[in-house]
Amino acid sequence: MLLGAVLLLGCTEQLVTPGSCPTHCPGGNPEYRDTVITVLPLSDSSFTGYSAHTSATSLLLSNRADLGESDVLIRFATRGDSVLAGDSLKPFTIDSVVVSLVLQQRDTTVGDFFLDVYRLPSLFDTLSSFEQIREEMVPDNLLRSLLIPAAAREGSFDMLFEGEELDKFAYAPADSTRLVLGVRLRSSAPTALYLGALASGTGTPLYRTYVQAEIGDTTLREQTLQRSAVENRTVREHELVEDPDLLTVGGDHSARALMRFEFPQYLRDSATIVRATLELDASGPLLGIAGDSARLDVRSMVADFGAKSVVNTNFVASDWVFSGDQSAQVEMTVLMALWQNNGLAVQGLRLQHSIEHSSFLTPMFHSTRSGGTPPRIRITYRPLRGLGGF
Amino acid sequence: MRPIMLFGALMSCAVSLTAQSSQFGVRGIGLPGRGLSVYSLGTGGSMGLLDGRSSTNPAALGLMGAGTFVFTSTQAWRNSANPTGEGSTREHRFPHLLVGGPVPGAPFAGALSYSSYAARDHIIASPGVDSPRGVPIDVVDSIGSTGGINDLRLAAAWTPLEQLSIGAGVHFLTGSNRLFVSRSWADSTYLPLRQESEVTYNGFGVSAGLVFSPTSRLHLAASIRHDGSLDVRRDSASFGKVDLPTTLSAAGRLRVANGIALSAMISTRDWSVADQGIVAGGGLGARNTMEAAAGIELLKDARRPEHLPLRLGIRHAELPFMLGEGSQPRELGFSLGTGFRFARDQGGIDLALERIERTQGSLYSESAWNLSVGVSLRGIASGF
């Protein structure tokens, strides 16, 4: 019993006393240093084509000159001209049609605006050009001018078509009952907005047809044929042309920037890194709608194969940029630990937009070729301290 | 056999078997231990050189009347103050163990003891502001240490005459400090930091002493102890050497009346020999120390001197390792003790309550209550 009490009591203590260095700090004052490592000359580039426009979670509509004119093309799944009842197809008559668009984000500094929704020829697809689409945006093809009031910030907007308006949804045989829409933004002042895209989940454009099927069973007559978009994309008047001397991130071609650094030896085994920040200077203010934001993701390279370099997907450093920003900082201490702990690690980073094809914000950062301040990593570290002194 | 098993078990919990910690143990090799039994603590340590249950004088083993096992448990409540603020701490330690006794039929006695040579247990929390990138950020630095240097003594005494005992001992100094430093930032973009290190110590010392009793009322004792160099290694790499002091001590106990004994002790250590090693290791230095103590023991029953006596003591000592430049730290202690025996005096429990005030100048101070409980098995012959 005595031995038990001894062992139980012998290992408990509470020892916290206020103190201050250097008086109470054997080894001296804590010392933290700051250093900056700059991207290696000519080792920073942007490459494009990493993701397809089908991965977009937002569709970009704009009539602002600085953002460029852009419309939206939406291609729905074929509706069909009959419904299946038992083992046979039955014709139907249409009661009404509802087309739904989801507003994700708008410029709240602009009041009411309209979404002019046009029906486009069914052969139009994602290869159709801005000019081709605009040519079809004529009054005869206008389905609806959807008013988005100033108070509406986001949400789904349904357009109901009944009666004579249903004629606008008539299909020629060549259409294969496929509805293709073009959406254009119209407002008293230049503005821009985001609509939900196919990959956005709940923001997907929808096309619903309410029908009366010619079926004997009256409980089966009323049916709804709902079709979602199978293709959608932003169609821009002038697509972005990446400047080879800048590091473009995002944009129309899903550009990503690769940067290579030389991690200093003195940080490898003799320092504890407490903060590392990737600092980037943009060539100009980031353009976007008011309050717009985008996340930049930084990953460390595993193997350097140029544009097709493999990155470590287990660790990502992220930070946000906002409309109007002229620089970006990404805290990436966790990535520095990968370099510090592995002498063979490729000391390169890949910078990408978190929502490619889905944002007006397209940062273009200075590189070692552009004459501005190139990317650099600011590292705050603590040198190996003589812990254990008297 | 049982005491030996218990002794072994306690040795295995060596981490926590160190003396009371203190902010005055942050620098240098720590707060020096005392190697005293609770019996001696009750008189401020003034009877330590005449107490075989303590490990300060090997000759005192000659006063032991029977084989004895002793261990000491100390609970401390402490309040520390310094320019940063105040803090209250508590801890529990086992600063002293001993097993030994006379050799039957021979004028010899021996003992193996385990005590704290220096304790370095602390966690210091230090709030502040740092600006690593030019922007002030609130930070909290913590620095801590657990462990200490332990003194494993093997000693023997020879009593050629009834009035004289001579003793000698060897001391093995071993131990370690597990040190850490950590920092947390108010700005979460800075990672919290923790660095750890282990410092190990190895040393060797010898001691000798005598106890002379010219009369049955008067007992005199003296001892000398020399500890060589302390080999210090940090994370398995040599970190240098620290020379350890020579300790000279003398004490006397006088029975002024039946059941009343006075005692006094003085001791000096030339800790300045450690100065060079301490400074080389980043410390502020070491200073010589002087210690003096006096006590009185009032017996309730002269035939059972260790049953419910009253012990009082006062002690003043200098501490070798300074927290900052300026005057040398010192401590003043008052103690009160008693004890009782049971099982035909085969078992005993001693109690000592100490009030200790430590100061260095006006900036650093500390007050502590130490309650020590000593358990002894098989009893011990008294000088009375």
Image (cartoon, coloured by chain):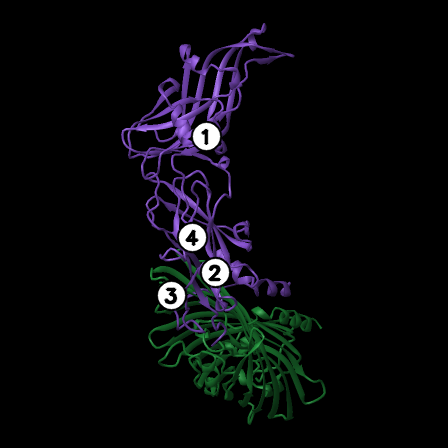
Chain colours: A purple, B green
Task: Identify the element where label 3 is drawn.
Answer: strand
- N-terminal of the two: label 4 or label 2? 2
Q: Nearer the viewer, residue A304 or B217?
A: A304
Locate residue B8: give its quadrant. Answer: bottom right
- N-terminal of the two: label 1 or label 2? 1
Mark 1 and mark 4: Cα distance apart in space: 38 Å
Please check whether the numbered discs 3 and 4 fall on a single chain: no
Q: Nearer the viewer, residue A62 or B44?
A: A62
Please check whether the numbered discs 3 and 1 fall on a single chain: no
For label 1, the residue is: A128
Task: Identify the element where label 4 is drawn.
Answer: strand
- N-terminal of the two: label 1 or label 4? 1
| Depicted A146 relative to depicted B307: above or below | above
| Depicted B366 relative to depicted A354: above or below | below
- Horizontal placement of A230 versus A182: left or right? right
For label 2, the residue is: A261
For label 3, the residue is: B86
Tell me the subunit letter for badge 2.
A
Type of the residue with mark 3: Glu
